Amino acid sequence: MEVLEEKEEEERREEEELKALGVGDSHQDVETKASVEPVCVPSDLLDVDWSSSDTSQLPSSYKTNSLKEKKLLRIADHFLQQYAHLCPDRKLLFLCPANECGVEKFVSTTVRPTLLPYTELYRWDGCASFVSDYLTMEPLKSPITPPSSLYSPTTILKYQQGNCFDFSVLLCSMLIGAGYDAYCVHGYATREVCTLDETLELCPLLEKPPEVPKEERKKSSNKYKVKPPPDLQSKFELQQEAKKAAEGEAARKNKERGEEKVTGVEKPERDPLYGLRVHAWVLVLSGKREVPETFFINPFTGNSHSTTDEHFLGIESVWNHRNYWVNMQDCRNGCKDLTFDLGDTVRWEIMLLESNQPVQPLPDAEEEKELSDKETNDTEKEEEDMSFDMPPSWVAPIQVSPREFETRYSQGKKVILYKKAKLEKWAPYLNENGLVKRLTVYADLDCTEAVEVREWFKNREDMLDMREVNKQTQLTTDYFRPGHLLSLKAHTYGSLEPETKRTMEFYNEARVDGLQKRVENATEMTEYFVGQDDFLHLRHVEFGKRGKKVHLAGTRTDVNSRPIVQIKECFHRNLEKPADEDVAERIFLITEEMIHLTYHLKDKYITASKDLFKVAEMNRKGNKMIMTPEMCITYQAGSSGKGKKLLHLYKLLQELMEEEKRVKQQVRQSEAEVLNILKIRENEETAVKLSVSIYNTERNEKRQQYEAMKNTVEDDLLGQEEQDLDYLAPFLIQIGPREKMPKGQALRVRDDCLTDLKHCLVDKVNIIQARFEKAVEELQKKNQWFQENRNQLSAEEEADFLTRHSEATFHIHILSLRLNREKRTAPQKYLAVEERLRRDPRLAEHLSPPRFPCSFTPDAGNQC
């Protein structure tokens, strides 16, 4: 009876609230009857036909409405009536669609803020990318009306498909959970946005990043600061350059338009439903999560758009998990002129008044103050009646398993068509070569002639990250992540055969020699260095033609290497040496047997000092070299006197000849390294290996083997322990070893064993019981002593007593738990031993299964 009285009281209060809102009695009676039971919508009216799906396992919140939800539905219906009366020319709002169980739910309660445990989903772009990749787009049944149903995000994730409203609600739930100020938007968009037609859009991967303009110098208010020099650049020349750039851009656009006309494809055909197509997207306001500017997110693509984007044509309403706002602004120019200050009650009509939401003062606030007291009181009363806290979301917690998050795409693959491009995406580990994304660029709009192919890889042991293939030049460029075996960063090649045109880039920080890049073809090789101790930054090698080639079977290379014709090395300036002693360029002319040195320029000089050594003219007597002045030609910049001494030049020549040997050896090592890299790359491409994280227990074979071995060892140890534990051993020793026992002796051994076990279990319970009673008695004595001497104790002594009292209480609690556990498990242990004795082969032939179950219950303090 009390429950019925409470329900009647609740219904009476709701009726009074509806009367205060101005709802008539007749309409109220209809609504009251409709709210008693959940409103069900026929399955044939739902936008997505999932009538065959099983809804019996869904929570009760999916199938019924709480009292607070019913009240919210009545408020929404009243709000809709007022809106239809005040704005008869506008379409009805999207307020209370049916869910997957056919029950009407308010749209704000369908939003379930959720932060999923993945780092990528902590940022808006990661959430948007996941939603657009994970779900498959289903178009609206009617492109000009919103759907009649709105399913929960959990159901949408289960079936991986939905319309634009389903996409938006799921994305908004994830963004709010990640801390963004996000809202679902019901509005209008172009045909291309509503139908996910991106064939006329440029692929985002092909867009060039915008150039960051140079920051203008801020004028300082400090009058003592030195004024910067005046800008002497001609403004007229800047204007002319800007004019030329604009003309070039216009000519380029005209050329593109001409090409499109030639191919028969111009702008998209005129849409007869332009401005009427319904679409839903997500609005992210600035402020939270350091968002500098308000922007839109198209949930179909996961791309962000400016609020002035011409593809978004108007907004009817927005909502989040707290409230619902109706746009009262003019959308003739699309969303360009809209203001997204939801606290502005003139531009945005709020449904539920929130006491904790600040409302900005209006421009005509002073005029409103002049209203009569009666109108003011009525307004305050109406606002008080409309104040209502949004009930919690009826949606179950949103969960995405690691496997689902990794697989992401439906069927593991997704294809997107752009203007002159096709983008393909795969789930990790789906392809054996680790391919996860491929972008194919075409020369025509029909996508028949491929120009360039870009491929992205993941989890490759060779650290391959991306590959670019130019179909016109037949050049392939591989890009590697840090960690490659040979510190390879990029490799551009036409073929993996040696002595062909190629460019290799390295992570110079990971190499001892600081090699940054190596460019090679059949006749030349150029190496670039960074951070060398000798300031070397470039080495250029020219090769000559080979003689007769001697090819060995089973090998890829020839025995005779390419002859070196010339080696040129360039060095940076060493400030510790004088300029005319610091070599800038060193050339070893191997075939001509000459060495040419060029030094750095001295300050205020336009010519550099040079040395030329003619090694071919050097006379040799045994191991000694005889040098003459004609063998060396020197030029000393700025010196009119004699040049360097012959002895100095002789020592310098000796050093250069040693350097020549060392450099030639380094060149041969570079050639061998190139061959080694090509061989390794060929092996890596022939047998691609994918790396698996040690924490990925589903794919890591070593981890699976370890777990299997661990379980096997544990099972073996458990079986060995059971095998080693022989309950009959102490009793069989008393009668001596016998091959076969008579029935009477077997029964006596069985009874002795069970009796001994019974005594052990009872003794254990009695010991725990005695300890428990002793601890309780000591605690009572301590409490009595504390009550008698409480007034005489200091604060420290009282605190010490309370600490000991807490420890004693905890000890008594543990003893109580152990006592109850032993009393509960003792019969189970007794029955287990009895069953094991019955199956023991030494007693089995004399024992029969018990006719009645044994009921052994040890009682502390009493004999069993």
Image (tube, rainbow, N blue to C red):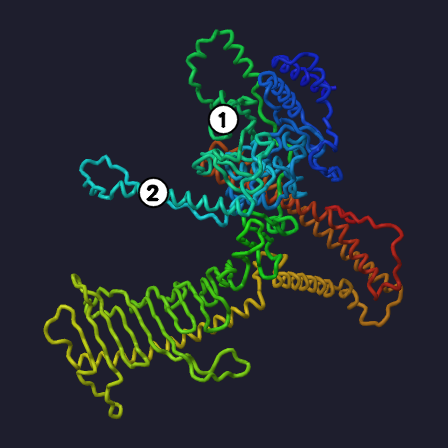
Amino acid at circle 2: Ala
Rendering coords of residue 387 (x, y %): 56, 20
Amino acid at circle 1: Leu
In-front residue for pair 176/282: 282
Residue 418 visible somewhere in the drawing: yes
Residue at the spot of label 1: 342
Residue 857 lies, with reference to residue 507, above or below; the image says: above
Residue at the spot of label 2: 242
Which mark identifies residue 781? none
* Left or right: where 739 falls relative to 477: right
Residue 545 lies, with reference to residue 776, above or below; the image says: below
In-front residue for pair 481/300: 300
Determine which quarter of the picture holds residue 530: bottom left
Mark 1 is surrounded, within 10 Å at the Cα level, by few (under 14), some (14 to 19) or many (20 or more) other residues, namely: many
Q: Nearer the viewer, mark 2 or mark 1?
A: 2
Q: Are marks 2 and 1 in contact (CB under 8 Å)?
A: no
Rendering coords of residue 64 (x, y %): 71, 29
Could you tell me which secondary element the residue under label 1 belongs to? loop
In-front residue for pair 286/523: 523
* Left or right: where 634 falls relative to 73: left
- Give the mark nearer the N terminus: 2 vs 1: 2
Q: Residue furthest bottom?
A: 622
Q: Quarter of the image for the N terminus: give it.
A: top right
Q: Say which residue appears at 52% left-offset and 56% top-offset.
A: 451
Rendering coords of residue 518 (x, y %): 40, 67
In-front residue for pair 285/631: 631
Q: Say which residue appears at 49% left-offset and 71% top-offset.
A: 678
Q: Say which residue appears at 62% left-offset and 48% top-offset.
A: 401
* Left or right: where 853 falls relative to 38: right
Mark 2 is surrounded, within 10 Å at the Cα level, by few (under 14), some (14 to 19) or many (20 or more) other residues, namely: few
Residue 127 visible somewhere in the drawing: no
Determine which quarter of the picture holds residue 844: bottom right
